[in-house]
Image (tube, rainbow, N blue to C red):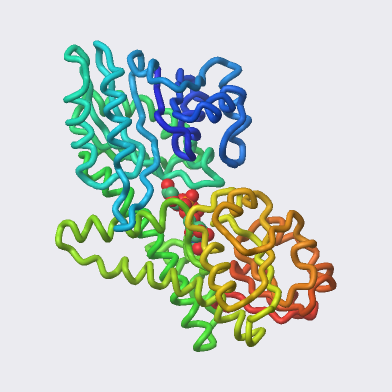
C-alpha cells in the first residue's frame, strides 16, 4: 500500500519505518526543514535502538521518503496523523495541531478514496471532529473514512513492540476502512513472535478510550507497587517479594510491578491527567487516578526524604544523580522523575552532579543549576551520595569498588533496585533501595 505519516516523533517515525520494512511505500511529512533534510540522509532526531539502521535500509530500497509538503497524501491509500498531543495546564490534551493537520490533509486529498487514521492519543469524540474538519475542507470528489488506531509502542523497545504487538486496535464506523486497515496490519499480527497478537475492531470512541485507559491502568499498577514498597519499608516486609508474590497470580501478571522513583515519560503523566479531565467533562470524579498521581509525586519526594535520612542536612552536600532519562534506552526527558528530584534536592541546598549515557543534551534544556558530567566515574568523584535514577545497563555493570574509592562518603540510594543490597553493603556502602 501507499501510506503517508504526518509526524516523525517516536510513534510516527517508528511505525512508518516498520510499515516500509514490511514492503509498503511510506511517506513521512514534517514541518521542520532541517529535520526533514537530516531524515533524508538517515539522520534521525531521536535515540531509539535499531531505528537508524531500519530508516537507512528503507531509504536505500526506496520504500521510505521524507517531505515538507503533503503531496503524497493524494496518492495514499492510508494517511496516519501521528503528531504530538502535549498536555495543557488543565490536563486536557492540546489538539490544535491534530486539527490543523487534519485540515491540511483534507486540502491535499484528490479524487478517489483514502482512509485517514489518527495514531495520536486523543480524547473520545476527537475523531468525529476530525471527520467534520476533513469533510468541510476536502474537494468534493474526494472520498474518505476516518479511523482511530492508537499506538502502544514503548520507547527503547519501539521497533520490537511494533513488530510484535499484543493487540492492534482499529476503531472505525466504516467496513471498507476496517478492511483496508486490517489488511495493512495483517502481517504484524500473523508475524508477531508470540503469535498472540489480537485484533480489536470497534467504534471510534472505544478505540480512543482504550489508549487512555490502558496507560492509566499501567500507571495505576506502578503507583500501587510504589505504595506497597513504601508500606513494606515501614513494616519490615520485603516489598519486592510481596510484589513478586502477587504478580505470579495470572490475574495480576508480573509486569509493571517494579517500584522506583516514579513513572515519567511522554505518556503516563500526560494520559493519567487527561483521563481525569475527560472524566470530569462527563461529570465523573476519577479519584482513583488522583491518587495514582499523588503516589507518583510521593515516590519522587521519598528519594529526597531518604537522602536526608542518610546525610542529615543536605545543604552543601554533593549528590550525584546517575540516569536522567525517564527510563533506560531512550534520550527522552519528557516528565522524567529526575527533573523534579533534582529541583527538590536543589531546594534543600545540595550541590548536584548528573550523568546519563544518552540524555545529557536533552537534560540540559530542562534541568538547571546542576553540573553535567560526560563520564560515570567523573560524575561520582567527591560525592557524599549517589542516587540511581534510571536503570541503564552501564550502571548495573559499573565497577562499584572504583565508585566507592572515588566518593567522599560511600552512600547509595538505589532508586531502581538494580544492585544486590548485600553485595553493595559488603563493599562498604550504606545502601537504601525501594521497598527493601
Ligand atoms: C508507555 C506505554 O507502556 C506504551 O504502551 C504507550 O504507547 C506509551 O507509554 P513508555 O512511556 O515509552 O510507554 O515507557 P514504559 O516502559 O511504559 O515506562 C513508563 C514509565 O514507567 C517509566 O518512567 C518507567 O521507569 C516507569 N515504570 C515502568 C516503573 O516505574 N515501574 C514499572 O514496573 C514499569
Q: Is residue 70 above or below residue 178?
A: above
- Give coordinates of residue 426: x percent, y percent: 78, 80
Q: Nearer the viewer, residue 92 or 206?
A: 92
Q: Identify the residue at image location x=66%, y=68%.
A: 352
Give the left or right position of residue 428, taking residue 229 as reference: right
Give the left or right position of residue 289, taking residue 345 as reference: left
Q: Nearer the viewer, residue 36 or 232?
A: 36
Q: Nearer the viewer, residue 388 or 102?
A: 102
The total number of labels drawn is 0
Q: Quadrant of residue 137?
A: top left
Q: Quadrant of residue 104?
A: top left
- Give coordinates of residue 132: x percent, y percent: 17, 31
Does the image show residue 69?
yes
Q: Is residue 298 above or below residue 368?
A: below
Q: Identify the residue at image location x=73%, y=77%.
A: 384
Q: Identify the residue at image location x=71%, y=74%.
A: 318
- Give coordinates of residue 127: x percent, y percent: 23, 37
Q: Quadrant of the N terminus?
A: top left
Does the image show residue 255?
no
Q: Quadrant of the C terminus?
A: bottom right
- Give coordinates of residue 167: x percent, y percent: 38, 42
Which residue, as the protein is rendered here, is positioned at the far left? 283
Give the left or right position of residue 198, taking residue 281 as reference: right
Q: Nearer the viewer, residue 99 or 148?
A: 99
Q: Is residue 60 above or below residue 154?
A: above
Q: Identify the residue at image location x=61%, y=23%.
A: 41
Q: Is residue 189 above or below residue 273?
A: above
Amino acid at each position: 500500500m501507499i501510506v503517508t505519516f504526518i509526524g516523525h516523533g517516536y510513534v510516527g517515525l517508528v511505525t512508518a519505518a516498520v510499515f516500509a520494512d514490511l514492503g509498503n511505500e511510506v511517506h513521512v511529512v514534517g514541518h521542520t526543514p532541517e529535520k526533514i533534510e537530516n531524515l533524508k540522509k538517515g539522520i534521525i532526531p531521536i535515540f531509539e535502538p535499531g531505528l537508524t539502521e531500519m530508516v537507512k535500509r528503507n531509504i536505500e530500497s526506496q520504500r521510505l521518503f521524507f517531505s515538507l509538503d503533503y503531496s503524497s497524501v493524494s496518492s495514499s491509500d492510508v494517511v496516519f496523523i501521528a503528531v504530538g498531543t502535549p498536555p495543557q495546564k488543565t490536563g486536557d490534551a492540546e489538539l490544535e495541531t491534530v486539527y490543523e493537520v487534519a485540515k491540511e490533509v483534507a486540502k491535499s486529498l484528490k479524487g478517489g478514496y483514502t482512509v485517514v487514521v489518527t495514531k495520536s492519543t486523543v480524547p473520545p469524540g476527537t475523531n468525529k471532529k476530525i471527520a467534520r474538519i476533513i469533510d468541510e475542507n476536502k474537494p468534493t470528489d474526494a472520498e474518505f473514512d476516518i479511523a482511530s488506531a492508537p499506538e502502544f509502542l514503548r520507547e527503547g523497545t519501539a521497533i520490537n513492540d511494533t513488530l510484535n504487538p499484543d493487540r492492534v486496535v482499529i476503531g472505525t464506523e466504516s467496513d471498507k476502512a476496517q478492511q483496508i486497515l486490517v489488511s495493512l496490519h495483517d502481517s504484524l499480527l500473523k508475524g508477531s513472535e508470540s503469535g498472540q497478537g489480537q485484533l480489536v475492531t470497534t467504534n471510534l470512541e472505544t478505540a480512543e478510550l482504550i489508549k487512555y485507559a490502558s496507560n492509566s491502568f499501567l500507571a495505576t499498577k506502578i503507583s500501587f507497587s510504589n505504595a506497597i514498597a513504601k508500606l513494606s519499608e515501614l513494616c519490615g516486609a520485603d516489598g519486592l517479594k510481596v510484589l513478586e508474590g502477587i504478580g505470579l497470580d495470572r490475574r495480576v501478571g508480573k509486569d509493571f510491578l517494579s517500584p522506583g522513583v516514579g513513572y515519567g515519560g511522554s505518556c503516563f503523566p500526560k494520559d493519567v491527567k487527561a483521563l481525569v479531565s475527560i472524566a470530569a467533562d462527563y461529570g465523573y470524579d476519577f479519584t482513583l487516578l488522583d491518587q495514582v498521581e499523588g503516589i507518583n509525586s510521593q515516590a519522587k519526594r521519598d528519594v529526597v526524604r531518604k537522602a536526608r535520612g542518610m546525610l542529615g542536612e543536605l545543604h552543601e552536600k554533593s549528590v550525584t544523580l546517575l540516569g536522567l532519562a525517564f527510563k533506560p534506552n531512550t534520550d527522552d526527558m519528557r516528565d522524567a522523575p529526575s527533573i523534579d528530584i533534582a529541583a527538590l534536592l536543589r531546594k534543600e541546598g545540595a550541590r548536584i552532579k548528573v550523568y546519563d549515557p544518552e540524555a545529557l543534551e536533552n537534560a540540559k534544556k530542562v534541568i538547571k543549576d546542576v553540573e553535567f558530567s560526560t563520564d560515570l566515574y567523573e560524575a561520582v568523584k567527591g560525592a557524599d551520595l549517589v542516587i540511581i535514577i534510571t536503570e541503564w545497563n552501564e550502571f548495573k555493570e559499573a565497577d562499584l569498588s572504583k565508585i566507592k574509592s572515588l566518593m567522599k562518603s560511600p552512600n547509595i540510594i538505589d532508586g531502581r533496585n538494580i544492585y544486590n543490597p548485600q553485595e553493595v553493603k559488603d563493599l562498604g556502602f550504606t545502601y537504601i533501595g525501594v521497598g527493601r
